[in-house]
Image: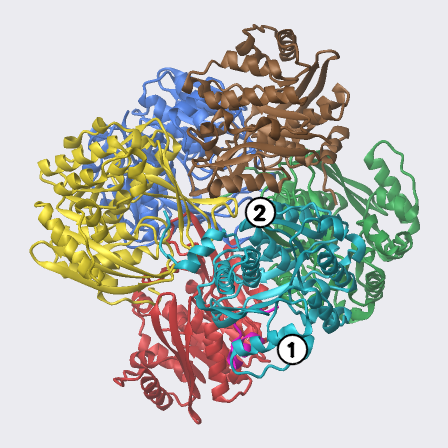
Chain colours: A brown, B blue, C green, D red, E yellow, F cyan
Amino acid sequence: MARVVCFGELLLRLSAPGRERLLQSPQLEVRIGGAEANVGVSLSCFGHQVAAVGTVADNALGEAAAGELRRHGLDTSGLRKAPGRMGLYFLAPGAIHRPAEVLYDRAGSAFALAPADAYDWPALLQGADWLHLSGVTPALGANTAAAALAAARAARAAGAKVSFDGNFRPKLWEVWQGDARAILSELMAEADLLFADYRDMGVVLGGQYPQAEALARVEAAAADAFAAFPHLQWMACTIRAPRNVDHHALSGVLVDRDRGTALAPQEEVGPIVDRIGGGDAFAAGVLHGLIGGWEPERTIRFGLAAGCLKHSIPGDFNLVSEAEVEALVGEGRYDVRR
Amino acid sequence: MARVVCFGELLLRLSAPGRERLLQSPQLEVRIGGAEANVGVSLSCFGHQVAAVGTVADNALGEAAAGELRRHGLDTSGLRKAPGRMGLYFLAPGAIHRPAEVLYDRAGSAFALAPADAYDWPALLQGADWLHLSGVTPALGANTAAAALAAARAARAAGAKVSFDGNFRPKLWEVWQGDARAILSELMAEADLLFADYRDMGVVLGGQYPQAEALARVEAAAADAFAAFPHLQWMACTIRAPRNVDHHALSGVLVDRDRGTALAPQEEVGPIVDRIGGGDAFAAGVLHGLIGGWEPERTIRFGLAAGCLKHSIPGDFNLVSEAEVEALVGEGRYDVRR
Amino acid sequence: MARVVCFGELLLRLSAPGRERLLQSPQLEVRIGGAEANVGVSLSCFGHQVAAVGTVADNALGEAAAGELRRHGLDTSGLRKAPGRMGLYFLAPGAIHRPAEVLYDRAGSAFALAPADAYDWPALLQGADWLHLSGVTPALGANTAAAALAAARAARAAGAKVSFDGNFRPKLWEVWQGDARAILSELMAEADLLFADYRDMGVVLGGQYPQAEALARVEAAAADAFAAFPHLQWMACTIRAPRNVDHHALSGVLVDRDRGTALAPQEEVGPIVDRIGGGDAFAAGVLHGLIGGWEPERTIRFGLAAGCLKHSIPGDFNLVSEAEVEALVGEGRYDVRR
Amino acid sequence: MARVVCFGELLLRLSAPGRERLLQSPQLEVRIGGAEANVGVSLSCFGHQVAAVGTVADNALGEAAAGELRRHGLDTSGLRKAPGRMGLYFLAPGAIHRPAEVLYDRAGSAFALAPADAYDWPALLQGADWLHLSGVTPALGANTAAAALAAARAARAAGAKVSFDGNFRPKLWEVWQGDARAILSELMAEADLLFADYRDMGVVLGGQYPQAEALARVEAAAADAFAAFPHLQWMACTIRAPRNVDHHALSGVLVDRDRGTALAPQEEVGPIVDRIGGGDAFAAGVLHGLIGGWEPERTIRFGLAAGCLKHSIPGDFNLVSEAEVEALVGEGRYDVRR
Amino acid sequence: MARVVCFGELLLRLSAPGRERLLQSPQLEVRIGGAEANVGVSLSCFGHQVAAVGTVADNALGEAAAGELRRHGLDTSGLRKAPGRMGLYFLAPGAIHRPAEVLYDRAGSAFALAPADAYDWPALLQGADWLHLSGVTPALGANTAAAALAAARAARAAGAKVSFDGNFRPKLWEVWQGDARAILSELMAEADLLFADYRDMGVVLGGQYPQAEALARVEAAAADAFAAFPHLQWMACTIRAPRNVDHHALSGVLVDRDRGTALAPQEEVGPIVDRIGGGDAFAAGVLHGLIGGWEPERTIRFGLAAGCLKHSIPGDFNLVSEAEVEALVGEGRYDVRR
Amino acid sequence: MARVVCFGELLLRLSAPGRERLLQSPQLEVRIGGAEANVGVSLSCFGHQVAAVGTVADNALGEAAAGELRRHGLDTSGLRKAPGRMGLYFLAPGAIHRPAEVLYDRAGSAFALAPADAYDWPALLQGADWLHLSGVTPALGANTAAAALAAARAARAAGAKVSFDGNFRPKLWEVWQGDARAILSELMAEADLLFADYRDMGVVLGGQYPQAEALARVEAAAADAFAAFPHLQWMACTIRAPRNVDHHALSGVLVDRDRGTALAPQEEVGPIVDRIGGGDAFAAGVLHGLIGGWEPERTIRFGLAAGCLKHSIPGDFNLVSEAEVEALVGEGRYDVRR
């Protein structure tokens, strides 16, 4: 089992009950999430030692968010508490032809306002095997961009591998006019593992991927990434084909610089319970395989199965054990387990 | 944007939670509905000025029903309050092979007992572009039948167009032995737009529609309707093919007296969240296109998309904007909107 | 209508709300169930006089369980109250690729600890047309095994027919090292009707069923059963093909010793609301046909339709009337019933 | 233990959650009640054999109401099912200075419309020790007034004692212009036990009770009642002093024609959980004492304790055992019972 | 009935269910509030024509907030929609010795960021009899302070009376270093009616109020206010004595420049359902009396009764009619109203 | 801040919603509790480092219980997982005159069945300042009695202080015929701090305490305890006077062997939200004062304030900070904190 550090923002998700629109009835369900925390919780459920690093508001909401991570086994001693607000997002899950709606209310959060030097990376990364980051963090502003880069460099310096999930969000970058291309490039340059597809590579490297097949586009983008970033060993992504809001099809790709492409064949996923966090669950699954030194084929199949299972679980977290993912990889059993 | 008056009964819907049978557990969810109110709320969401005319009980239930219409932007100054009871219906939504059950408890409501001359139509219709009515209102008794006819005639006199949704309910007509055929004929004779299919025309005009294809039956019925009702300009309906209780297929037809048939191709609709109000949502969509002077093709596609979206929303109302319907007409996007 | 006695354990089911994992949020929904009670409630809904025999804890939980049976029309005067605990099971319903999880917590229940001679069978079976039992009861221990056998023999002595649902549960037998094969054989030897498939016959009779088709395996097993158990007149079972957790396909088989095999063709069942009790609902449907002296074909179609409908109803009980099952057998109507 | 028949209307109570106003949020909690059913359920909880006689709607709501009585041990074989609607009442419980609001919606119910000769009283009363009725039933119309009188006379003829709860409701009598005074007099003339106070006697006998003390008024009214109704043996009532909506004080009086007045001293009752059914719980408690042949003092103390306990239980029913009432009569223990 | 304009910020209140701490369980109840909206809704319930002026976010949350005001009869055509966020506050209601906790999250809201000239006051105030404002609005920043002052001056210019509720919030003023004393003075100088007590006057006028009795302090402060602000005609406030979190005592004072002090005697208020909005309900009650030209005594008694009733209603709004308040002023009736 | 180890059983509490009786409606709220865990969570909220030692079932329920402790900051690495069941208790909270009901279902739990040598005390107590135990643990059987004694002795050996809460439960001791007096004596002999009153001392030491005043009885019992147990330094308890189920009065006593009695004067506590865990909250408060080396007076006031606050919080845990307790000790503020 590995020691993994996840750095990113914890968010409170406030969602409409059932399939209602936002505030159609006067109730909100509260879940905790955040791209990196989602990966961290999943890895903790697989048995790894995971530490969350970041900043939460020093109030009841921040305490509740941290508590939820501890509940799922994460070490939160690296979560700072600072005056300010928690980032929020409001969610109406959608149905049939009506897409889920996310309404972000995260500007000015305690995490976004934390100074870049608030984190003592050598201490926080002590003993870590991996650092996991995502492209949401640098998108929040100059402070968090600098912090993310410092984290990645400190990890590399400390001998920990770096996992980076592209997660390109143009709207966030526009707010503060950040140079997404430059900053993401610097971060990817530190990464051993990159979760990204041809769209991200188009943004960061300016590549064009006119291939008809999604797989071909991913492979071409991976080739560009390996060329641009010498430290990079793996690039992985899902290929998602939504049939309607309640039913998607998912496949998974892992490209290893040395061993080439491994593919997990398409799974039909529906009726979807909760689509949020599906990509993060996939990332955690792939990380678990790489940590275990598994064959690429086994790794990507595990990652895809993990991603699929997430769609059956309410909330952002993929609360499944390694054995449950393995059971699906092996041969799905779809009747009651007694 | 148009000014639209909707005349009809507001009902309280009391539904079992989740997919339970009625009173399986001791809770009921309350929604407000009514064929005409449903159309009115949808038109208000599309940006029109909508006034609800009718009668509610002068108690907390009637006030709550009126308040719900105001919440969605309707003008309720034309809603009378009178002693008596609110019409209710109990709903168990069904699932898979078990059809939804509706248990009406609306006899003797303040609306049904309101005298025909309770409404000052010239004042209520002042400035109105359209009046929308349905066949449920005349089915409730002699009072409401007379009121509906008075409304339709006043609208025509005032230069407002008349939209009439057939909504034939034999059980209601039987209660008071009303002459459905004669009264519906009189109402349809005032209509510019008729929501009806071959079954309604069979009842009202006595036509036979043995054609194999539903579309052919609709077109034949429309031809009969145009022949019988010289004011009538459009007839529209959905063609619904239930695959099971949770999954229907829907297409839409709009026949313009002058420009012939426009068809919106079949959409698969499932898993259904709430099927109630699907026809009303379609009607509102078609009305929106006609108000906008759109091409029949665009109108019927918009109407069908609106009807489909309703199936994804709990309650009787189609709480979607014009932009959301347009997005579905254009090309559905079935992943999270951030 | 018949008088039917059901003997078995009443359980409290504590289930996670929605599609959550157990205790993901701090709420449990409580339902009452138990293989034999489920059959009894369904038969009561079909109009039969049903008496529940067993033992519940003499506390608020036992009283609630008994009350729930009375609510659905069962006579509970044959339910003993004794010090001790109620059997519980915790359920997380699963979704998509994640199977439902059942966590039993029934050891040491008042039912399991009741002495074999606690029941005065001649009195309890007076006037009964049928006794229904399942293989769960003898699996709970020597006491309940003896009680089940006593019940079956008393029924035969009293001229009541015996219905036995195999329900083989190896884990329960292992706990007390009971000789499942011998005891189940003795019970089946008393049965007129056996709900079982080739897997049960493999256990009890040691048969091998290598046939490719499930139907062929069932027929071969039935042949063995008729050979082994001279009193046996009917063997019935469903053949279940899970497509994913939310969607199964079901067909039904009834083999009559004299009239051969009747088959109800496969139905697609999904999205499933609650899969628990599907087999019991099928059993009640078949019993209803046999009680009515129906043709095997009609009986098995009714049984399968009953089993399908159960999947649409929350909880363990199949709360549908005979007319509702008939409506599905005839021709399903999948739109709102007003 | 006695056999008791309760004749009256079953109602569905639809209440706002928590302390909300009606429809402040879109949910209603459903409880079953009715003055006579409340008494019946309480007597059943005390161990008596209770049969409910009346008429419910032949739909899911009527079935649910009957089922709820069975759940609490009542025999519902004397409950007719007839086409029509269930009587409803909407409740907002109030708080502090805001009184609870009851909104009746019971006109035209299946019970109110049942013909007077719908009930076969000799059969329904066979073996009965007591018949319990209330003044609500005759207030509903000529049919139910005749039925109530027939029931009371049949009971007397059959040797069963008659318990009658005055429950004077002027609004109901006004609707059909019934002669409350005459009809209630006829009913009281059949009663052995009368739940009434000086206000009821003022209405029925025209008495004036200007005494300063409530107890003196009750005793004077009882004297008038014993004079007017020779069969009458007992009159009982509570004296209620509301301090605010959440806190009332209650005492109880039982006047025995022969043994004079027994008083249960005032209890402080608050914070009140549910005040509805408090009087019925008191009535059941007094009946329990009279059935048991207890001393008046013991009877009235038990009755008051039962009435007090009801205020602690959500819903209309007093779901407490005899032992729980006795514990309060003895000496209240107000800490956790383990 | 009067036309009243309320200008201020609409907030979403997110509260913990029951008496839980924030996020103790993962649910939040949503209510709409805001000091001025609370007054406006109450006045609308009393029958006045009320218009809400302000700015909400142009998203589903802002739309829901506006819809809630319409539901209660307010005209929201003067509510601007602008990009940005809605102000939020999180509430845990407290109990016994644990005070309620409010966690504001309102910085940077669309309302706070709206430019001072965003409102066309002459148009918005056309036909208005009163403008109601509170001290929260100027406390939010220079923009809203300027807007509030512009509104007050425009009202005075248009002949509308000005009602101002002090509502001093030091924390808000500190954020932007606004000169509370100067700005509040300017606003109070425009007011005809001031809701304030000696603490506010201490802040704004620098007065010292060492009197032992709260009433004496209020009267001294009122004397100072009348001296400082020549337009001022009335000053009113409640005097609140919390006995514990669930139980407060409240009295009310209205000082009329010409007619002196009117006092509403202390009421015991408990167990409190929802304390939020109690002061706003009092203000609306006083305004209602002044609009009606009532005697000061009657006005302050009505105001206090209104304030007391609010404590019995969940949410920020005092959803009671004039008749309900009058009933309490007259003589409270604390038993069920049927 | 101190390091504290709590050893005891974690239980799942399943409670009826609101003030309902058990299973009156089909829902249970789940909370986690246990006498020692309750103390541990409170100490963690006060800022101490707390480790939970014990055994939970190796299933989803055990995992949830452990997760809840982690959520509140406890170290659960000393919680063993073992096959078996979780101890449960069902709770109906009671109201007014109806006492709360607890129904234990904890026999045969994984904790109760854990062998005495399952815990490696020297390792588990490393660095600990205090060990906290209660009398429930030895009452569960010979295994847990031996484990508790081993723990206490290991603590003393390791230089950690021992806190022991008597919590005498005769019913549990009877089950296995354990010698309560002997075993509790042995445990108390190891204690530095004893939570107990005269009833416990009566049981363990056979003392008689006929004094009229509760305080005198406590002091006499403390004198006996100090005489019998030379290591004992402090004895503390609450004196609880229930006025009704919703309202108790509480005072607190701390007797220091050297400094005599400190008393916290009686507080009125009501309306009670949740009485469970009140004693544990008091214990944690006293421990916090002793850890801090506070004066006895300050310690007992803090302990009583902590105990009072618990009654305002749903669930077993006293989720309040030191500052919140201090605020109440200082001078309660009972209005909203903004």
Q: Is disc 2 on the same chain as disc 1? A: yes
- Residue ID for mark 1: F202
Q: Earlier in the sequence, mark 1 or mark 2?
A: 2
Looking at the picture, tell me which residue is in the foreground, F274 or E241: E241
What span is in magenta? Answer: D323-338
- Subunit that carries the residue with mark 1: F
Crowding at mark 1 (Cα within 10 Å: few <14, some 14-19, many 20+): some
Is residue D331 a member of the stretch shown in magenta? yes
Where is residue E67? Give x, y as percent: 33, 38
Looking at the picture, tell me which residue is in the foreground, F326 or D252: F326
Q: Secondary structure at mark 2?
A: loop
Crowding at mark 2 (Cα within 10 Å: few <14, some 14-19, many 20+): many
Q: Nearer the viewer, mark 1 or mark 2?
A: 1
Q: Which mark is residue F72?
A: 2
Query: Number of numbered discs present?
Result: 2
Q: Secondary structure at mark 1?
A: helix
Looking at the picture, tell me which residue is in the foreground, B89 or C242: C242
- From where the camera sits, is residue B138 visible? no
Is residue E296 a member of the stretch shown in magenta? no
Q: CA distance from mark 1 to mark 2?
A: 36 Å
Quarter holding residue A3: top right
Looking at the picture, tell me which residue is in the foreground, E155 or A73: A73
Q: Which mark is residue A332?
A: none
Where is residue B206? Give x, y as percent: 42, 32
Q: Is residue F228 above or below residue E101?
A: below
Please state which amino acid type lies under the numbered disc 1: Gly
- From where the camera sits, is residue F282 visible? yes
Where is residue C162? Give x, y as percent: 80, 58
**Residue at image location 79% in from the left, 62% down from the top:** C160
